[in-house]
Every structure is written in C-alpha cells, then in structure tokens.
Amino acid sequence: MSDNFHHSGIDSSRIQRIIHALQGASHWGMTTMELNEACGSTRASSDVSEARACGAAIECEYHGKSANGRKIYRYFLRPQTQTIV
C-alpha cells in the first residue's frame, strides 16, 4: 500500500471553492451539506481532505445527528500560524 495521496493542487478551482466558502462562514463553520450546496459539490468531505493535503488548516467537529439520524459534521477554516525565524 502506498503512502502517497494523489490530490489536486491548491490552485484547483474545486479546492478554491471550498476555501472561499469556509472563509465566508460564520463562527459556526459549515456543515457537509452546506459546503456541498455552496460549492456545487457532492463530495465536500473529500474536497476538504484534498484542501488539507494542500496545506489548508481545516478542522472538523462532530455536531450531533439530524432528525433522520444522519451524523452532522461542521468544518472550520483556521488561521495558520507562521514561524518567525
């Protein structure tokens, strides 16, 4: 099994849509469904994984279950810390 993860680059329009949507989100972040709707995607969680692989500081928190029992996750774009040398 390979340790390499093939992903799009940070300049990918799909990755940029995820980052842009999260930048505009409130302190509540965005759920997977909200990201899907905002980005026109059906695989926001995979897009988030690719954005992380490109260096985006995206966190995910479990937010409970919906009325029909589906798990709800919220995503947050966190500011990245910079090392001052």
Image (tube, grey):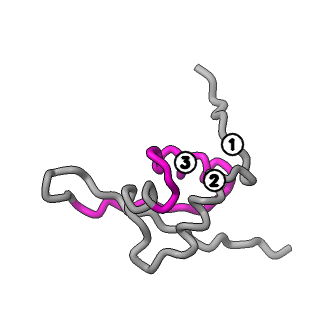
| Image quarter hosting the N terminus | top right
**How far across and down, in percent of the image, does residue 34 sit?**
40, 62
Q: Callout 1: 10 Å neighbours few (<14), some, many (20+)?
A: some
Image quarter for residue 73?
bottom left
**How far across and down, in percent of the image, does residue 74 sit?**
38, 63
Outermost residue on the bottom side: it is 27
Q: Which contiguous range is marked in magenta?
A: 38-64
Are the residues tagged 1 and 2 within 8 Å (C-beta)? yes
Q: Earlier in the sequence, mark 1 or mark 2?
A: 1
Q: Check disc 1 and report the residue beneath it.
A: 8
Magenta stretch: includes residue 39: yes
Q: Could you tell me which secondary element the residue under label 3 belongs to?
A: helix
**How far across and down, in percent of the image, does residue 80 sit?**
65, 70
Q: Check disc 3 and report the residue beneath it.
A: 47
Taking the image as shown, residue 83 lies to the left or right of residue 14, namely: right
Q: Check disc 2 and report the residue beneath it.
A: 15
Image quarter for residue 65?
bottom left
Q: Callout 2: 10 Å neighbours few (<14), some, many (20+)?
A: many
